[in-house]
Image (cartoon, coloured by chain):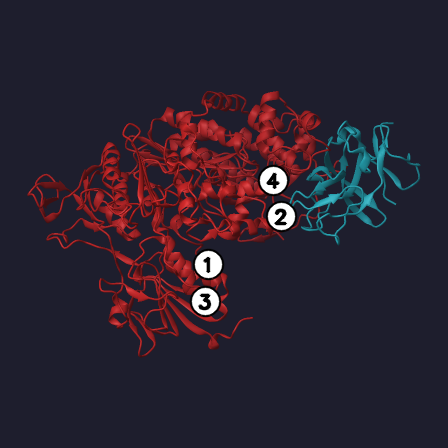
Amino acid sequence: MTTATAEAPTMTQTWQTLCNKADLVPFSGVAAWIETSEGPVQMALFYLPCGPNTPAEAGHATELYAVDHRDPFSGANVIARGIVGDIQGEPVVASPLHKQHFRLTDGQCLEDDAVKLRTWPVCFDGDRVVIDVR
Amino acid sequence: MNTPHSEKHHLIIIGNGMVGHHLVEQLIERGATDRYCITVFGEERHRAYDRVHLSEYFSGRDAQSLAMCDADLYAENGIELRLNEAVTALDRDAGEVVTEAGRYAYDRVVLATGSYPFVPPIPGNDRDNCLVYRTLDDLDAIRAAAETATTGVVVGGGLLGLEAANALRGLDLDTAVVEFAPRLMPMQVDAEGGELLREKIEALGVQVLTGRATQHIEDGEASFHRMVFQDDKVLETDLIVFSAGIRPRDELARDAALEMGERGGVVIDDRCLTSDPAILAIGEVALWNNSIFGLVAPGYQMAKAAADTLLGGELTFAGADMSTKLKLLGVDVGAIGDAHGNQNPGARLFRYLDEIKQEYRKLVVSSDGRKLLGAMLVGDNATYDTLMQYYSNGLELPEDPAALILPATEGAPTLGADALPEGATICSCHNVTKGSICATLDAGATDLGAVKAETKASTGCGGCAALLKSVVDHELEARGVEVDQSICEHFAHTRQELYDIVRVEGIKTFGELIGKHGQGLGCDICKPAAASILASCFNEPITDAAHIPLQDTNDTFMANMQKNGTYSVVPRVAGGEITPDKLVVLGQVAQKYDLYTKITGGQRIDLFGARLEDLPDIWGELIAAGFETGHAYGKSVRTVKSCVGSTWCRYGVQDSVGMAIRLEHRYKGLRSPHKLKFAVSGCTRECAEAQSKDVGVIATEHGWNLYVCGNGGMRPRHAELFATDLDDEQLIKIIDRFLMFYVRTADRLQRTSVWRENLEGGLDYLKEVVLEDSLGINEELEAQMQTVIDNYACEWADAIQDPEKLKRFRSFVNDARPDPDIIVTEERGQLRPA
């Protein structure tokens, strides 16, 4: 396992296979389509491989993040196309439309306390990317 | 709180020159619009413009760029500006201002009518092509007359006369200056200084005739006019400009029976009130203490005092220092205080004359040698700021005052910013002291820009720019402020430093750059900046695996993201030239993929509404038809706009389309700190609007004139003339260097216009670097440009051949459906976001 996730997933009903590792783009995002019990969800999936520059001390404990693909400010489904990076050690994505930053760990918008993206647990299972949509 | 309109007093300002405008600014700043309903009358068509820099009108600036403020400043503040409406009378009995259009009631009036050029009463002075130099309309008349002229004469060798001579020279006329006094600039310089000035000006090809009184002007033989002097000598010329001093525009006041000076001018007191306390006067129409002040700084001080008077304050005008620092025809002239040494009995002189370097400096000091009373400088104003500080602040002179004017090689003492007292005036136009600059810094300003914005220092004539910078730098240092220029939290470097690091160390990836010189993962600031630097240096495809995570979404998908997450596609149409066949293909592609089409300002066609997953197919069809990417998405060279030029146009003098296409293909794909727009016009009519571009080329009879650092958009800036009459190869060489120097030194997202404004040393420095190779880097800059050109490849052609790269264009990584949330509606026969 190449995962840095603390807990390995237990394969219950809620974990679904999304795609393969080869579908991801290192240090960037892709969009995924998921059917959940509450309806379809467009999800932005980010892959930050651990490396010498990974800010390990600031809670960057995982290589994979899944957040809403929908940009709450514009209503457009574009978050996966934002630039990822870190602010004060916290991994973030910047909306490609108006550059608001969203924390990848919990989806919180750094510019507006009232705005938050949904997040889902995601990790590698071998070469597969699996997600818990509950 | 706003007073209701009906209860406000009516304030009428007559005149919209620099001083009248300054009054308006002062009134706005001090909230006077709450008390007054303000109307401003301007006789000219143009709103207030910078008359100090009028001669630049002939070197590329226009009325817009000379304007003192944004077009809507007055309206935004509820001030009515009535231009092109001359006031004809001041009816004090009725309390009304009269114009040809009507009568306007007033409670208070400010006369800011300025002055008019004095035309000596010489028989023949009213002939055609006898003109004056004061307004933009005057300049238009001079320009029109110059079209059929080869020679021009300026009558008057003072400050304004030499400015006018410079303007005539700028119009390529053989120019002469005729002065009645025995020397040029008799008010500012003495006989030695005047002689040196003459030599320097004659060396520029301007003929100087002093001690000449024109008797009359008649028909010439070889030229349009013949001027006959007191000794019966004659001078023939096609065009005459009178610039023999100014006279106050005081006719309104005279007709209204206000108290006048013996030789004109409306008498005012220290509060700028005329003999009728409802009426104030400021600027060159006002006579204070029997003096008219013909400079802008005293006018501004009067405006300030007048604003205070109107608001019930106590600020007074207490006279003004007439010290001046000028660059006339490229020659430095400075005069401080009692420059002639004839107002202070017992004054002692120090004089330094260098006839080789052509520099003259004179100090007038008190009899005990302790205080500076005046100074005169010709040929070099380097010591002006220091001398001015000694003079205006009454500082004790060094033991040997001569050291102040001796050549600097001997270690002349310079007066550091720290030696200045708090009360030292740094900017005399806006009366900003060192103390007020320090207060601004204490209040939180952290750089020169903030100080300028807050105090307006150095925004008048700009003469104090160097001094202001040294004071700000010094004071910031004294406060222990080290201004953090880091690009973001991941690099303790500026963009320029990162650029140098990349070049010197040959770093080719962001991973290596941040690993060696930064920390963390990077962010949306440093990643695109690094991507741009890497592309500028090595020009590898931006979609390569190492580079793709760095790009803004537009670069990532090589298209421009629109508000609904779809993209617009702009193929390159070099020079705006397109074959009918290609035009048909664009239409077919747009039809097939339901794209909204619009013509862009850069002479291309923009196809909107392309879905992410359709981009590769769209480009496949475009490339098959011979198109290539247009880089509309990149911080890079965009388009080279052109007019049809000599190929079709009956006015064209060069093949502007051919040159535009050549330039566009040369520089396409050049990534830079910000986007770059070009244009090429085939003649001086400038249909391609090259003077609003980063790089503008205008054809001349002899080749090409190059303009640089213009801008349209949010903050328009007129491009500046950089080099003239270039052949094709010279033009390209200079543009190569210019662009690479910009790429190398600009800040991230800094357009050439802002870069140029922040460039220390300004246009002259840029010319030295690019034209004269003062830094010895031109060969390197050219080689770098060649690398970029050699490595150019269409990014889309590269991407559609690479299955790995195409994977990015899937709507969903696990599902082929298109994004169902993109909803469109029809408008005017096309689709747009719902």
Mark 4: amino acid: Val
Q: Label 3 belongs to which residue?
A: B314
- Which one is nearer the viewer's eye here, B123 or B746? B123
Q: Pointers 3 and 2 in contact (CB under 8 A)? A: no
User: Which numbered tag is attached to residue B126?
Assistant: none
- For the residues labelled 3 and 1, the Cα–Cα distance comes to 27 Å
Q: Which residue is mark 4?
A: B483
For the N terminus of chain B, give its image quadrant: bottom right
Q: Earlier in the sequence, mark 4 or mark 2?
A: 4
Label located before the other in sequence (1 or 2): 1
Q: Which chain is the one coloured cyan? A: A
Q: Colour of chain B?
A: red
For the residues tagged 1 and 2, is the chain the same?
Answer: yes
- Which numbered marker is on residue B563? 2
The residue closer to the viewer here, B615 or B150, is B150
The residue tagged with tag 1: helix, strand or loop?
A: helix
Question: Percent x, y for residue B222?
Answer: 10, 38
Name the chain under label 1. Answer: B
Choose top left, top right, bottom left or bottom right for residue B288.
Answer: bottom left
Question: Badge 3: few (under 14), some or many (20 or more) residues near its Cα, within 10 Å?
Answer: few
Left or right: where B315 falls relative to A7: left
**Category of crowding for the residue at label 1, using alpha-carbon neighbours closer than 10 angstroms: few (below 14), some (14–19), many (at least 20):** some
Residue most toward the left? B232
Which chain hosts label 3? Answer: B
